[in-house]
Amino acid sequence: MDPRSEVLLRQAELFQGPLLIAGVAPDDLLGRLPNAQGWTWHAGDHALLDSRFAGRSHYGTEVPAVDFAAAVVFLPKSRELASYLLESLAARLPGRELFLVGEKRGGIEGAAKTLKAFGTARKLDSARHCQLWQVSVEQAPVAPVLNDLAQRFELPLADGPLQVLSLPGVFSHGRLDRGTALLLQHLDGLPTGKVLDFGCGAGVLGAIVKRRYPESQVTLLDVDAFAVASSRLTLAANGLDADVISGDGIDHAPVELDLILSNPPFHTGVHTDYRASEALMEKSGEHLRKGGEMRLVANTFLRYKPLIEAALGNCAVLTEDAGFRIYQATRR
């Protein structure tokens, strides 16, 4: 069980009423708190929770339309996302209790200071390398409008500037990351047709390909609801039309693809997780048509070339720079 869930269960008497748990872990916590509802923006976690606790897990970027008398926030990695979650829930809980739980190495002590904006905060527990904080909401904020929190930046490209919008919690929020910047320099000679931007984030790759190759059928896929929403904002800001879908990994992608592009993710919260990236490479042959291409960027310390070669029988390194490599492979 997630250590944050274990800390909550140490104080289970506080959580017997109608409760909303934001960022709920995909463990047995909802089973141990029968009046609790879960809210998650991770498609995989939602699928697992919904299969076990049907109707009690809610996926998306907005506070679910359910009744709750108190709420718990599992501290996310992103400070901006933490602020959005806390303000959104505090706005719904005037005179009621809001809790924050997180790992010490995840910055829980610093994040707990933000609770002072709503009232007097106090630490309830410290165990499992985690802390649990509580605040009675005396000064309820105005509920934030998520799209107003989007950060916009412009990419100068040869065919004109591209507007990029990212929401709190999305990878490389408000800026272009170095890996994607390198990949953008190596997008020449791409095949057209059915294209997948895997782990799309704010939609940079998918938007660029759709603008450059308008005849292509582009799909953007991400496990994170905030990334999915960001990609839709980016496409709309540039007058582009593409499919944006949520799903946990390559199994949710279309098949018979002509091209897979990716800066594949390998972090989940404060913990390192390579499963989605490795599954992308191992199963790439199942989603590419014969002659289809995969092109991706990754940190040089990641041993991805053997995985790609095992799946597709070949793998070329197009370039290496500033700690990143561009890999290219074709399904034979």
Image: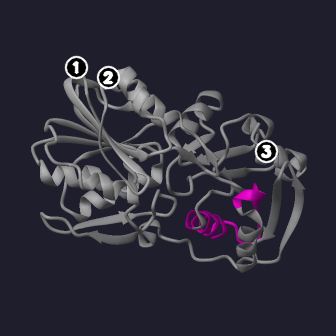
The residue tagged with tag 2: helix, strand or loop? Answer: helix
Neighbour tally class for label 2: few under 14, some 14-19, many 20 plus, Cα within 10 Å: many
Residue drawn at (81%, 65%) of the image: 134
Quarter of the image that includes the N terminus = top right
Quadrant assignment, res 98: bottom right
Say which residue label 3 marks: 3
Q: Nearer the viewer, mark 3 or mark 2?
A: 2
Quadrant assignment, res 318: top left
Say which residue label 1 marks: 332
Residues tagged 1 and 2 counted as in contact (Cβ below 8 A): yes
Residue drawn at (73%, 38%) of the image: 30
* Residue 314: in magenta span: no
Closer to the camera, 105 or 122? 105
In percent of width and height, residue 68 lies at 69, 54
The residue tagged with tag 3: helix, strand or loop? Answer: helix
Residue drawn at (14%, 41%) of the image: 216
Say which residue label 2 marks: 312
In percent of width and height, residue 102 lies at 74, 56
Label 3 and label 2: CA atoms lie apart by 39 Å
* Residue 81: in magenta span: yes
User: At label 3, which amino acid type do we have?
Assistant: Pro
Whether residue 16 is visible, yes or no, is no
| Residue 48 in the figure: left or right of residue 153 | right
In percent of width and height, residue 303 lies at 48, 35
User: At label 1, which amino acid type do we have?
Assistant: Arg
State which region is magenta.
80-106
Q: Nearer the viewer, mark 3 or mark 1?
A: 1
Q: Earlier in the sequence, mark 1 or mark 2?
A: 2
Residues tagged 3 and 1 counted as in contact (Cβ below 8 A): no
